[in-house]
Amino acid sequence: MAPSSAGSTGTLPAVRPYRPLPQEVLPECKTAAVAAVSKALTWAESDGAEAAARLGGGDHGRQLALAFRPLLRGEVASAMEPIYPQYGGLDDNRATASVMLVGRQLLLAEGASRPRAREFVVDVRLSRAGSRWAVTSARVGVPPRPARPDAAARELLTNGRIVLPEPARADVVSGGIGGEVTGLLNRLSSRWKLHVQVLRTGHPVNVFGTGRMSNHTRGRAVDIWAIDDTPLIGSPRSLWEPVVIEAARLGATEIGSPALPRGRAGLPPVFFANATHADHLHLGFEQSRR
Ligand SMILES: [Zn+2]
């Protein structure tokens, strides 16, 4: 599609390239995930229709372009800034992975002098062959419709100490996030500023590599990638340990972190740690078994 009013449309700012943070687990895996999303969401003077070619062409490129379609419409130019690529799962052999990328898409409409921005989340699936990671599929998180959030959800939406990317905010606005999670975040925010990666939208439906439904899908879990503006990855345990201890005291029953916390004696056995959770805290609530 040729621009019909050449000269009147502005330009997109240069976006900073992605650099993995120090001590990321398998930084090459995250780099491959971000690169694929960047290819899909970077175009100029077109409608994004040739995304399949940007994604490598052939059936695989067409399939990936189809997966990214919710983010490919409308504007004459698009660029992408990653916010954070967090693991949604990593298998024990470190041969397959889910990387949930939260990012910002800058979109320039025809005739507009400035871009508008929207935040998105994509669950990128990858597999490893030797030392090389290849994207096998992707799923853009499509936020739910707004509904009637309850009081705890409304409090969370105005809580400046809980940073919610747009898809997670939409989850809260939809009323689909349980009161345990919204209440927990509000209470933790009195001591910490927490950066949420995902609530429901964008998270794998099932716990990675299993057929078991994730508590994220039920609106009963949250992933947190940074505390007080500091990413978990590469940080000492003093950053996150007090948060998980407090979350357990406040009733969370499913707590994943980079390592098992000290100071957990006397608390219920709710803690787990693995490579997937090296870059985030998972705070969840099992469904009541009554
Ligand atoms: Zn989680």
Image: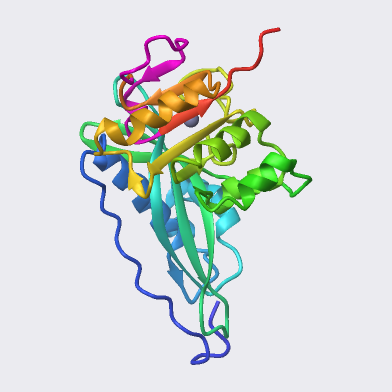
Question: With 89 as the anchor, is 230 left or right in this view?
Answer: left
Q: Residue at x 61, y 69 (%)?
A: 74
How was the colour assigned to the protein in this rendering?
Answer: rainbow
x, y percentage for residue 191? 45, 40
Can you see residue 143?
no
The image quarter in which residue 279 lies: top left
x, y percentage for residue 268? 47, 10
Question: With 51 as the anchor, is 66 left or right in this view?
Answer: right
Magenta includes 275? Answer: yes
Of the 4 image quadrants, the one containing the C terminus is top right
Q: Residue at x 61, y 28 (%)?
A: 220
x, y percentage for residue 205? 57, 29
Magenta includes 232? Answer: no
Give the residue at the far right of this rendering.
Answer: 148
Q: Residue at x 25, y 47 (%)?
A: 21
Question: With 165 as the anchor, is 232 left or right in this view?
Answer: left
Q: Between 159 and 112, which is closer to the camera in this rendering?
A: 159
Instruction: Specify the principal SS of the magenta part.
Output: loop
Q: Which residues are magenta?
A: 261-280
x, y percentage for residue 245? 42, 24
Can you see residue 159?
yes
Q: Residue at x 60, y 54 (%)?
A: 70
On screen, residue 265 above or below 195: above
Question: With 145 as the anchor, is 103 left or right in this view?
Answer: left
Instruction: Count all numbered tags in the image, as a single digit.
Output: 0
The image quarter in which residue 130 lies: top left
Of the 4 image quadrants, the one containing the N terminus is bottom right
Q: Between 110 and 206, which is closer to the camera in this rendering?
A: 206
